[in-house]
Image (cartoon, rainbow, N blue to C red):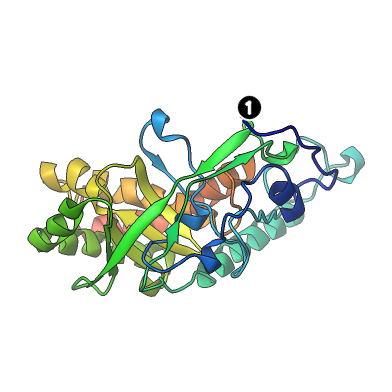
Amino acid sequence: NYPKQKIPKEKGSSRDLAKAGKKKNVPSPEKESTGKLGRGRFLNRMLSRGPSMSGSGNMGGNQGPNHIKTVAGPSTGKSLDDGRPVPPERDESAQRGLDSMLEQSIKESKKVKPKGIQSPETILTQVPQPFKRGSEGCETIPAQNLKPMGTCSNGFQLFASKLFPESEDFLKQNVRIIDDFGKVLEDLCGVFSLDKKAVAIYHEPSSGTIAFNSSRSLHFNLRYFYALHYRNNLQFKSECYSYWFTTMAHELAHNLVTSHCKEHGYYTESYVTKYLPNLSHLLQTRNAY
C-alpha cells in the first residue's frame, strides 16, 4: 500500500529507482549492521514463486541497493547507421567490447565481508520503464540474517542463519558436504577467473534463495547443493557443475545491473556464452560427464 508517486523522467538512473518507491529509512548494505550477509543487492522474485537466484547489490562499490547501472545491453530492434549494412568488423569490435566489459566486471568483484551483514526486506515499487518485467511493477529485496562461521578447507567464508539454530548445527555436522561444495565453487571460480575471496557459502534453511550478490560479493546456499546434488551423489557430475555455473553467471550479471530486467538477462546470457567453453574443458578434465 504505497502512495502513488510521480516517476522521474530521467529513465534508468539511480535517481529513478531511489525515488520511485523504496521504503523510507532502509539502510544501504554499506550501512547495515554487522551480523548478516548483506542480501543488500538481492532483488529476486517473491518467495511465493519458489526458489530463485537473487542478486542485486551495489553497482560500482559503495552505492546503495537501489542503484541501477545500465551499460550497453540487449538490442532495441532498431537498425544501425540509418539502415545501412553494418560491416563485420564493427560487429566483431562490439563483441570484443562486451567481452572486455564482462571480464572487467568480474575483476571488480569484492572480498566477502567476514562479519556478515544484516538487512531488512525492502520492496521497490513503480520500477521505471526500462526495468519493468511485463506487468510486474515491483521487486523485493529479501531480508538476510546470517552470522559468520569461519572458513572451509577451500578458503571460502562460511555463514549460518541467526534465526535457525539448526543452521549452525548443520554446518558443524556436515563438513564433508561443505568441502565438496567448496571444491565445486573453486572449480567454477577458475572457469570465470573469479577471485575466491569474492565468494562465500551460507546455509539458510527456510528461504527460497539459491544465491545472492551483496556489494559485488557472491553467496551460495549450501542447502540447495545438498538437496539437489550431494544427496543424490551428483556433486561432481555435469548436472551439478552446469547448475552452479549458471547460478554464478546470474549473480555476476548483478555486478552490472541490479534489477531482474531485460539487461540482467542479457548479461547473464553473455556470461554463459563467453565462459561455456571453459566449463566444457573443466567437465572433460574432471571426467564429470
Where in the figure is residue 266, as x and y percent of width and height? 59, 45
176 with respect to 77 (left or right):
left
Q: For the residue carrying disc 1, how many other residues have a C-alpha within 10 Å: few (<14), some (14-19), or many (20+)?
A: few
In the image as oriented, which residue stretches furthest toward the top? Answer: 135
Where in the figure is residue 95, as x and y percent of width and height? 65, 56
Residue at 37% in and 44% down: 209
Name which quarter of the figure residue 78 lies in: top right
Residue at 63% in and 50% down: 24
Name which quarter of the figure residue 198 lies in: bottom left
Instruction: Classify 78 as above or below 244.
Output: above
Residue at 80% in and 47% down: 86
Where in the figure is residue 196, as x and y percent of width and height? 36, 72
Instruction: Classify 70 as above or below 206.
Output: below
In the structure shown, which secondary structural element does the residue marked by tag 1 occupy? loop
Image quarter of the N terminus: top right
Res 275 seen here:
no
Kindly identify the amino acid type of the residue bearing the numbered disc 1.
Answer: Gly
Name which quarter of the figure residue 4 lies in: top right
246 with respect to 263 (left or right):
left
In the image as oriented, which residue stretches furthest toward the left? Answer: 173
Residue at 64% in and 58% down: 98
> Residue 38 or 255: which is nearer the viewer?
38
| Mark 1 lies on residue | 134
124 with respect to 271 (left or right):
right
Instruction: Classify 9 as above or below 218.
Output: above
> Residue 100 or 52: which is nearer the viewer?
52
Where in the figure is residue 11, as x and y percent of width and height? 79, 45
